[in-house]
């Protein structure tokens, strides 16, 4: 289910002439039994609301006074969300015969045409207050207080996200909170301006419209309603934006090592986190260990517990990197198999996380895994999997994919590998001169190239993994020597520097003269700049084995933070 919160206005939406009919009450009860959280968001003063509505306990929280008050009907507690206007404002309006005049804990309210006196009083008293209109009602509130701010306070109290909310209203003062929700709906009797601005117009009026919306929510129809304002920008093609849906996306990013998968992922992740979607990045090799604005759990010496991950994710404002660099490669699928159903359970309860991003997906869900405990991408919100080898992934995981992004110089080969793993024919690729990635929606016969919209801030990936992590066998460097008698595996740059100190000169020079070091750094680490610097050392004549070792170690140390252990190339190192 995409949405697990329904936020409703009262007058003209839930209620007609102040009363809520039995059909609407029953619809709300069905939603509550299904685990949907219910919020009432009204401009009424609380006492006034309670005098006309006998069922406040249907709602988990009530936002009253147009965002100024938060009431828990089950605990019967009330919190003021802003400072009230000074008493002299109400005193002046009474003296001028303004009637009706409601004075709440935060709100002062009357009706037109007394807005003339209200505005004059605010001006003459030098007050910093705002006036909000709603179908003839005139409400005075502190600046920044509205139904959207009240909704945000209610969601924060319940550890819920606005990206899980459907809001429904009918009047001018509902614009703010309908826009703040993931989907804003208007009942049939709503003002034309609100209908024009909302995401969904209902066929029925007032409470019957709310019952209609409840049925769509429970039946899953709302999940399929497109909300273009929330589309996730991927790139551009033929002068048009290309966007991905924020919910239900089963996305695979595939291509050779160093081809740009991280560039695509970084761009999408930056936009998702920036828009407030909660993301979980499962990071087997430490590639996201320093990603800004995201909580990183785990390091080379510690694997985060699943319970620890879930505790952080209970707060929707916290996206999380689950760093598994400290775990053996063979143990990662088992860890992921434990984590995944816990994430789906959390989403079923709280409506978040919104995106699950799985790097090196072929390591976590290899082909040998017969069943992945997710039936569709929507079970985790949306799913993004990154891999070099789609054909090496579990067929059960591949069936979750509904769109593929191929990167690199040969996108046709990448798409063909994915299609072959599914037993499908590869799509025809529609090329573009400016295209740098290819997008294929798997229910189409064609894929098209487009130009990626890059991230605003480029992030340096792989630094910690390449420096001190455990790289896969096919990415490690092997010292074999001229006669291939050795097979010393460097699992990372730290190990490479250590082994370089210990191998004999013939082995060292054999690889140096063949350009093996620069080739490994360029092809496996994807660091063309460092590879070029190393290649210059490889081509320099007359260097002794000791000098070339030192030069390479210095070049690596300048770009990558290696563990703080002394080496023979460290001038401060002393034998002990």
Image: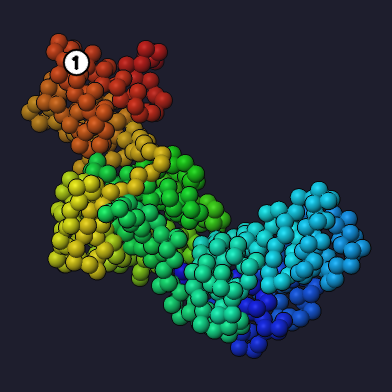
Residue lying farthest right? 95
Q: Is residue 63 left or right of residue 285?
A: right
Residue 453 at what x, y percent from top left?
Answer: 34, 47
The structure residue drawn at horizontal position 50% and vertical position 76%, both measured from the top left corner, is: 201
Q: Is residue 332 left or right of residue 275?
A: left
Residue 325 drawn above or below residue 522: below
Residue lying farthest left? 483
Of 119 and 552, the residue lying toward us = 119
Of 250 and 232, the residue lying toward us = 232
Q: Is residue 104 left or right of residue 212?
A: right
The structure residue drawn at horizontal position 44% and vertical position 39%, both measured from the top left corner, is: 290
Residue 528 at what x, y percent from top left?
Answer: 24, 31
Residue lying farthest top? 542
**Which of the colour schemes (rainbow, by chain, secondary structure, one colour) is used?**
rainbow
Residue lying farthest bottom? 22
Query: Can you tell which quarter of the image residue 383 is in?
Result: bottom left
Q: Is residue 111 left or right of residue 459?
A: right
Dot 1: what SS? helix
Residue 525 drawn above or below residue 350: above
Q: Is residue 225 visible?
A: yes
Of 539 and 514, the residue lying toward us = 539
Residue 358 at what x, y percent from top left?
Answer: 35, 54
Of 468 and 527, the residue lying toward us = 527
* Pointer 1 residue: 545
Judge the density around disc 1: few (<14), some (14-19), many (≥20) Cα neighbours within 10 Å: some
Q: Is residue 42 visible?
A: no
């Amino acid at each position: 289910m995409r949405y697990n919160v329904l936020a409703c206005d009262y007058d003209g939406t839930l209620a007609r002439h102040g009363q809520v009919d039995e059909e609407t009450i029953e619809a709300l009860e069905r939603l509550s039994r299904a685990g949907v959280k219910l919020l009432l968001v009204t401009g009424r003063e609380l006492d006034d609301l309670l005098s006309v509505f006998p069922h406040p306990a249907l709602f988990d929280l009530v936002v009253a006074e147009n965002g100024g008050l938060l009431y828990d009907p089950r605990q019967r507690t009330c919190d003021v969300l802003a400072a009230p206007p000074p008493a002299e404002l109400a005193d002046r309006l009474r003296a001028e015969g303004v009637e009706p005049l409601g004075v709440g804990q935060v709100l002062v309210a009357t009706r037109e045409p007394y807005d003339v006196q209200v505005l004059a009083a605010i001006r003459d008293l030098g007050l910093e207050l705002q006036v909000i209109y709603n179908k003839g009602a005139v409400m005075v509130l502190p600046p920044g207080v509205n139904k959207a701010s009240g909704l945000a306070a209610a969601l924060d109290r319940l550890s819920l996200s606005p990206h899980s909310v459907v809001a429904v209203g009918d009047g001018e003062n509902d614009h703010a909170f309908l826009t703040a929700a993931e989907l804003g709906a208007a009942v049939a009797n709503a003002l034309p301006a609100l209908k024009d601005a909302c995401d969904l117009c209902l066929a029925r009026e007032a409470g019957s419209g709310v019952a209609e919306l409840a049925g769509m929510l429970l039946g899953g129809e709302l999940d399929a309603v497109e909300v273009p304002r929330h589309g996730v920008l991927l790139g551009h093609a033929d002068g048009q934006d290309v966007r991905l849906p924020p919910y239900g996306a089963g996305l695979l990013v595939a291509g050779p090592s160093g081809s740009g998968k991280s560039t695509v992922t970084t761009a999408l992740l930056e936009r998702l986190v920036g828009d407030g979607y909660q993301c979980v990045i499962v990071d087997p090799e430490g590639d996201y260990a320093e990603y800004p604005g995201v909580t990183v759990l785990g390091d080379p010496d510690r694997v985060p517990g699943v319970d620890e991950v879930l505790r952080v994710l209970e707060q929707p404002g916290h996206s999380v990197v689950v760093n598994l660099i400290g775990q053996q490669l063979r143990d990662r699928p088992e860890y992921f198999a434990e984590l995944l159903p816990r994430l789906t359970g959390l989403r079923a309860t709280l409506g978040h996380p919104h995106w699950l991003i799985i790097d090196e997906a072929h390591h976590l869900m290899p082909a040998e895994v017969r069943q992945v405990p997710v039936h569709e991408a929507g079970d985790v919100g949306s799913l993004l999997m990154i891999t070099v080898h789609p054909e090496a992934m579990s067929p059960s995981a591949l069936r979750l994919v509904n769109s593929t992004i191929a990167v690199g110089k040969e996108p046709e080969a990448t798409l063909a590998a994915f299609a072959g793993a599914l037993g499908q024919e590869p799509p025809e690729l529609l090329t573009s001169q400016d295209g740098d990635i290819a997008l294929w929606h798997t229910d189409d016969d064609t894929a098209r190239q487009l130009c990626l919209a890059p991230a605003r801030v480029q992030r340096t990936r792989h630094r910690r993994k390449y420096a001190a992590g455990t790289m896969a066998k096919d990415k490690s460097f092997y010292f074999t020597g001229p006669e291939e008698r050795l097979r010393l595996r460097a699992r990372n740059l730290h190990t490479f520097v250590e082994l370089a100190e210990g191998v004999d000169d013939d082995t060292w020079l054999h690889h140096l003269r063949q350009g093996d070091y620069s080739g490994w750094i360029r092809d496996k680490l994807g660091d063309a700049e460092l590879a070029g610097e190393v290649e210059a050392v490889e081509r320099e004549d007359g260097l002794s084995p000791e000098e070339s070792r030192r030069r390479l170690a210095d070049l690596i140390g300048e770009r990558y933070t290696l563990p703080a252990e002394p080496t023979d190339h460290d001038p401060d190192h002393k034998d002990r």
